[in-house]
Image (cartoon, rainbow, N blue to C red):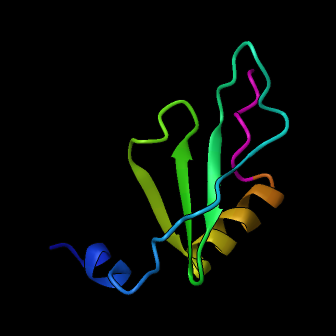
Amino acid sequence: MNIQDAHKRHLDTNFAVWHKSPLSNPPDNQCVEVSFSSNAVGLRDSQNPEGYVLVFDQGEWEAFIGGVEAGKFRLPKSQ
């Protein structure tokens, strides 16, 4: 077991309701879905709902959202 597994063992991974962005429209329909439990956030591929789920605790999710809002995940500008 790695450190991350031990840290996340206490998280509620009962993700009952999944949400997809309204911007994910046919024909591509390529998006991720997010679900919230009592103390965790799940993220999965909308085209493979039975596949792997990435699990984040609330602090990790807030840090990610903060980075998105700050523009830290934008593609580099081409020269």
Instruction: Measuring from the top left, give residue 58's x and y in whole percent.
Output: 60, 79
Q: Is residue 73 magenta?
A: yes
Identify which residue is drawn at 45% across, 56% down: 54
Q: Position of residue 65 (x, y in %)?
A: 73, 64
Report the magenta residues as a range: 72-79
Of 15 and 66, the residue lying toward us: 15
Q: Where residue 67 sits in the image (x, y, percent)?
A: 72, 61
- Image x and y of residue 24, in percent: 77, 31
Dividing the picture into quadrants, the one containing residue 46 is top right
Note whether 8 is above or below 25 in the view shown: below
Q: Nearer the viewer, residue 65 or 35?
A: 35
Query: Which residue is most to the top?
Result: 27
Which residue is pictured at 31% across the width and 74% down the height? 4
Q: Quadrant of the C terminus?
A: top right
The residue under the point 78% across, 42% down is 21
- Residue situated furthest front in the rendering: 16
